Amino acid sequence: MEFTYYPGCSLKGSAEELDESFRSVSEKLGVTLKELPDWACCGASSAHMVDAYLETALPARDLLTAERLGRDVVAPCAGCHVRMKAASMKILEDADLSRQFPFKGEIDIISGIEMFHKQDVLKRIKERRSKPLDGLKVVTYYGCLAVRPVEVVAPEDPENPRQMDDVLEALGAEVLNWPYKTDCCGGSLAVTRTDLVIKLSKKLIDMAIAVGADAMVTLCPMCQANLDTRQADMSKLSGKNYQMPVLYLTELIGVALNDSQATRWFEKHMVSPKNMLASKGLI
Amino acid sequence: MPQTGYATSTGRIAAPQADLAAIINQCYQCGKCSAGCPVASEMDLMPHQMVRLAVLGDVDRIAASKSVWLCLTCHTCGARCPNGIDVPALLDPIRHQILRDKLDTKGSPVPVFHKTFMDTIKTFGRVYELFLIGMYKLRTKKYFDDMELGMQMFKKGKLHLLPQKTGSLSEVKQVFKKSGLK
């Protein structure tokens, strides 16, 4: 199995542990990733806010390169995945855009979650896990862009997605029921309205605590950043001590595959998951 | 009301284009969008009210609201609307015109951030977090916000000193030249 890999800016910046864990566990699962050459930013949560042309033209360049290479693209970041897929759809339905950007739609753009949920990959996860996540209770946090806009992502169930749950169950973790799988963390207001981000993210973490989760699991770098970096503010505001680890799905796949790099990824977290994982005998 | 059945704008902000208007005209004001909106409690105009104003052609009121820059583009409204109306799809063209025509954004830091983000992409082709945050702070004079968090992220190696550029920067600059963003 081989994909063109579009890491995107977050994975080369504040979410390096997602890039490293994604590549490492893909290799262990026999999935070959070839980075898209000379990729540029997809426009993220900003391009569509400021200009209709940029929203499509920025991902279009990379879509054309990817189509020349012929392999399906995997974009681990939920935001990049939505922007690239939305641009590909716009080009295919707009004659003027498709003249400018002759993308034919011969390749698929899939999310990181979709990649690990492919039947072959799930099967290999079950076969190759050497350290099942026994006793680990998690909630899955998909966030917005793993399921929405629904016409772009086309999720099986936008209110109760199951793909990450299936992967984590294959790893041996206990996936808890909770109501906020797809509620917004404050996402794009991360820098501009931190007050709102703290409020929305705190609601999520409070619920994860209430249902008894050891950790929250996501695959969106924006969600992870908001939930992980804002816990110090939450502690200050509430007088409680917030210490909820927020892990990438790929980091837990790494733990279960006994990836020796795993502890290095955890160094990057503001709330370290190390003590919690050590107490379960997982690292 | 105009005979076409579609609203025409009564002010300087353009009414939604025909294909979008055909969708938003289906709104029967059930309010499900506002019930699920994570920032509805902060809004001066709630999502269902913005849709109604757009149907009536009073787009200027949407443009003058705080809500137009509060919308997170989380698409919860669009996922739940029984008529398939996605409020961010209504707001994006309005936001574009506000910026293009340099209309009043009521001191909201949100458009400043998004423009700074795009300036970063125009300069480097990829996000360079230190440049983005630095420029944003200069432009909003919010010099001391999140200083402590910034330091900690730097220590954890989450912020990089040097930018990474794309090999196709000249192509990215071409894309910007063709855009409406100046």
Image (spheres, coloured by chain):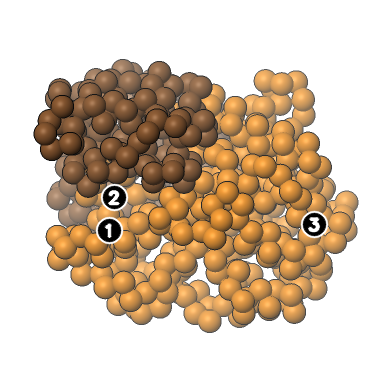
Q: Which mark is residue A90?
A: 1
Q: Nearer the viewer, mark 1 or mark 2?
A: 1
Quadrant of the rendered structure where residue B129 is?
top left
Q: Nearer the viewer, residue B55 or B173?
A: B55
Chain letter of disc 2 in the image: A
Q: Which residue is mark 3?
A: A174
Outermost residue, front direction?
B3
Q: Residues within 10 Å of mark 2 (few under 14, many from 20)?
A: many
Task: Provide the letter of the chain coloured orange.
Answer: A
- Mark 2–mark 3 Cα distance, whole angstroms, equals 39 Å
Q: Nearer the viewer, residue B92 or A42?
A: B92
Q: Secondary structure at mark 2?
A: helix
Q: Nearer the viewer, residue B155 or A40?
A: A40
Amino acid carrying mark 2 in the image:
Glu
Identify the residue shown where x is 64% and y is 27%.
A233
Q: Is residue A121 above or below residue A197?
A: below
Q: Secondary structure at mark 3?
A: strand
Q: Which residue is mark 2?
A: A55
Q: Horizontal placement of A145 versus B141: left or right?
A: right
Q: Are marks 1 and 2 in contact (CB under 8 Å)?
A: yes
Image coordinates for residue A99, horizontal then vertical, percent: 15, 66
